Structures are given as C-alpha cells and as structure tokens.
C-alpha cells in the first residue's frame, strides 16, 4: 500500500468515526436525555401526590385553612383568560405553604394554551402528568434537578405566594419541558398546582413588568422576552404574585434566555392578594 | 481496524478481554463527560445567572 493510499484511508476512517461520534452526541442529547427525564417525571407523579397528602395533613393538624378547590377561570374562544369575568369563590385568606426540601417534587405546572388539559384538581392529576405539556416541578435549579424536569429557583417564593416565583426548564434536551414557551401569548393561562390548591396565572406582556431597554427581543404576541443569560434582574422580587419561567434561547443554544412572566389571578391566595393590593 | 487493536493488546485472550473491557469503560466515561459538557452549549437548563 502506497503512502498516499494509507493517508486517504486514514482520513476516511477519521471522518467515519467523527460522523459516528457526532451522530451519537446528537442522539444522546435530543433523544437519550429525554428518556431519563421521562422516567423521572413518571416517578415524580406519585412522589408529588404523596407530598401533597403530607402537606395537607400537616396543614389540617395545625388548624390551617383547608386547600380550596380550584375556581372556575373563564377562557375566551381564543384560549385567553377573560379576567373581567373571574369571580372569587373562596374567602380572602392567606394560606402559607411550607418550603419544600431540595430536590423534592412539590408542584405540577401545565400550559392549557399549548394543548395541555386544564388542571381540575387531584382526581385528574394522573391524567394530566406526562401529556407532554404538564410537568412535575422540583425544588432547586441545579443541573441535577433540571435533568428531572423543571426546577424551582430555591431563592424565590413558592408558586401561589406573594413575590416572584421562578422556575427554569430545559428547551432542547432532557425532555425539553419549556421547548414551546416561544408560542405563549400575553393573556394565556399557566396553571400551577401545589399542596394548597390550584393557582392560575395569566401571561403578561413583559414590557408592562420590566424595562424594555433591558430586553433583547419580545415575542410577536408579547408573551415572552429574550434577555442575556446573566440577567439576574429577571428573578428579582416583584410587587405582586408573579410567576417567571426561564429557558434557553434561541433553541439549540444557551447564549440567551427566553423569559415568560405571568401574574396570579385565581387560586387559594388570589383574593387575599387582590384585596391587599387594592387596599 | 478493531482486529488490529485487539491483536495489539498484550497478554492471553482472557487478559485481552479484561483490557478491552476496561478500555471500553474508560472511553464511555470520557464520552459521557464530553457529551455532557458539549450538551451545555445546546441547552444548559435555562437558569438565569
């Protein structure tokens, strides 16, 4: 075999192995990691149910308020929340929720406007989870937790409480729970169930909450903003009961962050916060 | 190529089998770390900061 043939053969083998490695990398990232998250989410379904039961028992023993049943939230034909028609059914009381331990499955988040079934309470929980747009949320935003599904920023309040509750999620890998956040519109509902009840948030135009000059881009339907990956102001405390969701942007890149901001309009504490805000 | 790599391993056939297994495990661990590191360029979880 001449030297030239040997070189050509070497280049050929190198390219074949490089192709195999690139294929293996993409297969692992886009498919393999999703299997891990899917299995974790399946396991988390039971875990979060158990957590809900434990917290509700503790609240009952302490003589706290029993968790409210979710109120009916009027939805327009366009799938947006008709905020003017919301009627509070429960009393104006504040139900505090204990802080979950790190890694604990403590909430379920769903996106009705993206096709998820509206969350109607415990009985429907099993049906909701794993429909592709409903995810169990764990406490903590470290990489280990995020491989298992969306993770709640430990420094932020629990959803349903006063302040800026923040949740992060993968956009491309590990099940990509927040892959379709770029389809969210201002006015869309986001539903979070925690141990004290079901909290309905409405997506706000981020320009009404944050300074527009800090944003790189805003979604066509004003449902999200793109910001630098280091924009810590996104998760700063806010006056009101808000939910902030963060994920990578653009898709297949971690260069920036896509952020959705939503405000609490219904749930066990909504009436209390509304009356406190009006006072 | 695999045949040549196998022949290049020292020792008897059982020893070669152990060596090949160890090499495979090391390669897989290195690949797993490399894939994880490179994967963060695609998607690092979406956390701010």
Image (spheres, rainbow, N blue to C red):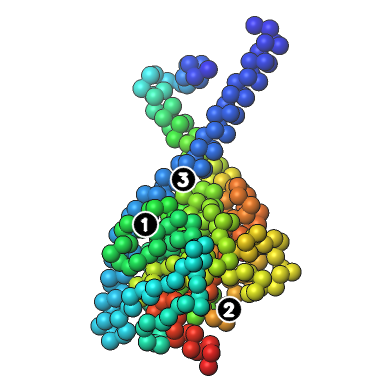
Q: Pick out the residue farthest to the front.
A: A77
Figure quadrant of residue A228:
bottom right
Of the pair A145 and A132, the residue shown nearer to us? A132
Q: Are marks 1 and 2 in contact (CB under 8 Å)?
A: no
Work out which residue is located at the far top of the displayed protein and give it: A1
The chain letter for the residue carrying disc 3 is A
Q: Secondary structure at mark 1?
A: loop
Q: Position of residue A214 (x, y in %)?
A: 71, 68
User: Whole-percent x and y of residue A129?
Assistant: 36, 57
User: Which mark's residue is nearer the viewer, 1 or 3?
Assistant: 1
From this view, report whether residue A210 is shown above or below residue A151: below
- Using residue A82 as the reference point, say whether residue A214 is left or right of it: right
Instruction: Identify whether B15 is placed above or below A65.
Output: above
Please report contact status of discs 2 and 3: CB closer than 8 Å, yes or no: no
Residue B5, image x and y in percent? 50, 20
Estimate the spatial distance between the alpha carbons at disc 1 and disc 3, rounded to whole Å.
19 Å
Q: Which residue is mark 3?
A: A33
Q: Residue at x 39, y 24 (%)?
A: B17
Residue visible at 54% across and 49% down?
A172
The percent coordinates of residue A59 (x first, y second) are 30, 81
The circle on residue A129 is 1
Question: Any mark on residue A238, and which?
Answer: 2
Letter of the chain that mark 1 sits on in the rendering: A
Query: Looking at the image, which is closer to me, A87 or A140?
Result: A87
For this view, does A223 lie left or right of residue A70? Answer: right
Spatial CA distance of label 2 from label 3 is: 34 Å
């Amino acid at each position: 075999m001449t030297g030239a043939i040997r070189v050509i053969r070497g280049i050929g083998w190198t390219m074949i192995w490089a192709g195999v490695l690139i294929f293996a990398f993409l297969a692992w990232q886009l498919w393999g990691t999703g299997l891990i998250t899917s299995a974790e989410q399946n396991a988390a379904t039971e875990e979060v149910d158990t957590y809900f039961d434990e917290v509700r028992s503790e609240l009952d023993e302490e003589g706290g308020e029993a968790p409210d049943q979710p109120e009916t939230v009027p939805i327009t034909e366009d799938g947006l929340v008709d905020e003017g028609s919301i009627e509070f059914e429960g009393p104006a009381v504040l139900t505090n929720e204990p802080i979950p331990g790190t890694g604990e499955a403590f909430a379920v988040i769903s996106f009705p406007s993206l096709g998820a079934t509206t969350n109607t309470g415990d009985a429907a929980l099993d049906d909701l989870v794993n429909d592709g747009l409903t995810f169990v949320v764990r406490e903590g935003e470290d990489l280990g937790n995020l491989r298992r599904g969306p993770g709640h920023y430990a420094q932020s309040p629990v959803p349903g409480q006063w302040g800026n509750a923040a949740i992060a999620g993968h956009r491309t890998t590990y099940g990509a729970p927040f892959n379709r956040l770029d389809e969210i519109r201002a006015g869309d509902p986001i539903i979070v169930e925690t141990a004290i009840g079901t909290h309905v948030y409405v997506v706000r135009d981020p320009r009404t909450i944050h300074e527009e000059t800090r944003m790189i881009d805003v979604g066509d339907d004003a449902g999200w903003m793109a910001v630098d990956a280091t924009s810590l102001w996104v998760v700063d405390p806010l006056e009101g009961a808000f939910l902030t969701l963060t994920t990578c942007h653009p898709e297949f890149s971690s260069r920036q962050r896509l952020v959705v901001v939503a405000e609490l309009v219904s749930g066990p504490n909504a009436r209390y916060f509304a009356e406190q805000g009006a006072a | 190529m695999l045949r040549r790599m196998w022949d290049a391993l020292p020792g008897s056939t059982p020893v070669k089998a152990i060596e090949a297994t160890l090499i495979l495990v090391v390669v897989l661990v290195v690949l797993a770390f490399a894939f994880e590191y490179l994967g963060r360029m695609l998607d690092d979880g979406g956390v701010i900061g």
